[in-house]
């Protein structure tokens, strides 16, 4: 995983989901998915597969906030778990990313339920 990609993803999430163009979100998830599926690590490959699910949700004709929220929450939980096994210099950044994914997922799920 590259630190630049981690930081770019965190920055994009900090600016808010609605400020991220759909094409940029799809490009970001595609880049991550490719890297994670090629990692050879089962836990990272699981994240890559969930990113594939998120990509499918983002490219479907109608966006379903609840489903996207659940996917983001799953990615947040998986990322937080992966942080515990990552290189020490990446752990804090991965935890931040995991927390932001969980928060974004919660917000979407809450909005969808309202």
Image (cartoon, rainbow, N blue to C red):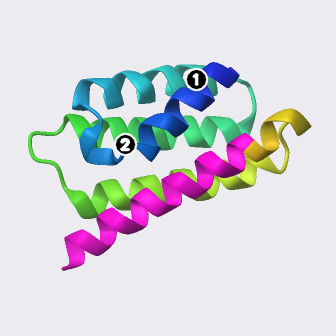
Let me know if residue 36 is in the magenta part.
Answer: no
**Where the N terminus falls, by quadrant?**
top right
Left or right: 42, with 58 as reference point: right
Q: Residue at x 10, y 47 (%)?
A: 62
Start-end of magenta stretch: 93-114
| Dominant secondary structure, magenta | helix
Disc 2 designates what residue?
54
Q: Residue furthest front?
A: 15
Whether residue 48 is visible here, answered yes or no, is yes
Q: Position of residue 60 (x, y in %)?
A: 16, 39
Q: CA distance from mark 2 to mark 1?
A: 18 Å
Q: Which residue is mark 1?
A: 5
Instruction: Please tell me which residue is depicted at 43% across the width and 26% down the height of the picture.
Output: 28
Q: Position of residue 88 (x, y in %)?
A: 90, 38
Residue at the right extreme?
Answer: 88
Q: Is 78 located above or below residue 106 in the figure?
A: above
Whether 102 is among the magenta residues is: yes
């Amino acid at each position: 995983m590259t630190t630049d990609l981690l930081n770019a993803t965190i920055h994009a999430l900090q600016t808010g989901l609605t400020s991220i163009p759909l094409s940029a979100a799809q490009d970001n998830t595609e880049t991550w998915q490719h890297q994670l599926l090629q990692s050879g690590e089962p836990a990272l490959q699981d994240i890559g597969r969930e990113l594939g699910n998120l990509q499918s949700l983002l490219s479907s004709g109608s966006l379903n906030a609840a489903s996207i929220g659940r996917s983001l929450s799953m990615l947040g939980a998986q990322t937080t778990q992966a942080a515990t096994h990552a290189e020490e210099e990446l752990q804090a950044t991965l935890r931040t990313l995991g927390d932001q994914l969980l928060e974004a997922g919660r917000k979407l799920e809450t909005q969808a339920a309202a």
